[in-house]
Image: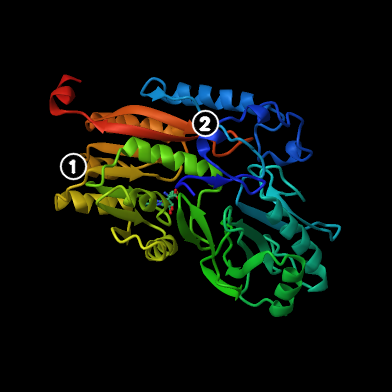
Amino acid sequence: MALFSRIDEDGKAFLPEEGLNYMENREKSPELCRYAKKCGGCQYQGVPYEKQLKKKQKEAEGLLGGIVKVEKIIGMQTPFHYRNKVNAAFKRTRQGKIISGIYREGTHEVVDISECRIEDKRADAIIRDIKELLASFKIKIYDEDSGYGLLRHVMVRTGHVSGEVMVVLVLASPVLPSKNNFVKALRKLHPEITTVVLNVNDRHTSMVLGGRNIPLYGRGYIEDTLCGHVFRISPTSFYQVNSVQTEILYKKALEYAALTGTEKVIDAYCGIGTIGMAAAAAAKEVIGVELNASAVRDAAVNAKRNRVKNIAFFNRDAGEFMHELAEVKEPVDVVFMDPPRAGSTETFMDAVAHLAPSRVVYVSCNPKTLARDLRYFEKKGYCPVMCQPVDMFPFTDEIEVVCLLSQLRSDQHRGR
Ligand code: SAH
């Protein structure tokens, strides 16, 4: 199988180049999802897919067009049921009915949803059945106001290629009465479940997951294949939710990096190491840096598991780490960076400028902070060359962009 091949809904592998032909889905499903009005999770429900792409292109051009050339957005061939991670909040209504779904935008009001067009279908079916099982196991729903009750959320993560399924029960206490029987009953209904984890969230917080994970069944994580490597994904580690489009995005990032096998590469904000691992085969050495300890543990295991020897990971703040590399004048040729929505920091970008790599490849899930950071990078001698939007989140207004920046030669820099 080619490095970036992927699997379509019928289980056939195909190359992303073929996937770009999404014509047949262009006008698909303009009708409104029945939860659309109440839920608000999909801002573009009822909008034909081709139109969604046009809107995103326009927005990307509006925010970035003045700074960099914006390529045509790459859409998804089948823009449905792409989310490999599904979170369901649970609530007991005043009438005593148990409902599950997502919070209505900007509130803590649970919208009762039993199926969703962008979520993995297996995950939705498991959540529906957990809702049915709760009463017979006398599992009480946690009440945010009183702090009474046990079950807060259920998260399901599915492996796009591996088919592995992880169910995370987020509870207010580490004690789940008759846990073995509960797991048994759930697995009887869904033998596809490969692991069940109890996540303890005993704080008064709007964060879904707490810090402690107790495996109740299986390994406590799932594995999946992305860009030809197998990745371990733990409950709290970041992993892109749309595996199909992620391969396209990373392929573009690697193309921009134009590695020749001799480069020293940084993968900043690396998560479980997905970009760095994809780059390692074409680089001399890769260093990954990431703040989340469990993601870094996964990253180290992933490198070993895939026998990638020229990569190392550090559990640090990316800005501080880069600053230290700059102080010791570590030679760096290419920097990949994939910060969270808030974007990067001046400390980080100052350090990049000191390290003076010839190229920076910036993956962003927020074109607003990307635009801000590109302007800062320009002041530091890095010119945005081009950027490629990829539709990672069909039916929502989220935009993902990968951008190439190139170091200006000193004569070019002075002239600006
Ligand atoms: N490149 C990865 C992860 C991108 S998401 C992938 O594609 O899967 C952004 C990542 O940045 C998250 O894993 C988050 O934990 C990490 N992060 C957030 N703030 C950070 C900081 N200050 N320093 C290093 N990593 C950070």
Quadrant the C terminus occupies: top left
Looking at the rendered structure, the kind of residue marked 1 is His
User: Residue 3 or 278: which is nearer the viewer?
Assistant: 3
Across and down, in percent, residue 113 comes to 76, 49
Determine whether, in the image, residue 257 is placed left or right of residue 77: left
Mark 2 Cα-neighbour bin, 10 Å: few <14, some 14–19, many ≥20: many
Residue located beneath label 1 in the image? 354
Residue 147 is marked as: none
Across and down, in percent, residue 231 comes to 47, 59
Q: In the image, what residue occupies the spot 46% across and 49% down? A: 227
Determine whether, in the image, residue 4 is placed left or right of residue 48: left
User: Residue 345 or 162: which is nearer the viewer?
Assistant: 162
Q: Earlier in the sequence, mark 1 or mark 2?
A: 2
Please tell me whether mark 1 or mark 2 is closer to you in this view: 2
Mark 1 Cα-neighbour bin, 10 Å: few <14, some 14–19, many ≥20: some
Determine whether, in the image, residue 202 is placed left or right of residue 385: right
Disc 1 element: helix
Q: In the image, what residue occupies the spot 34% across and 48% down? A: 279
Across and down, in percent, residue 269 comes to 38, 50
User: Residue 358 or 293: which is nearer the viewer?
Assistant: 358
Residue located beneath label 2 in the image? 74
Looking at the rendered structure, the kind of residue marked 2 is Ile
Q: Is residue 335 above or below residue 130?
A: above
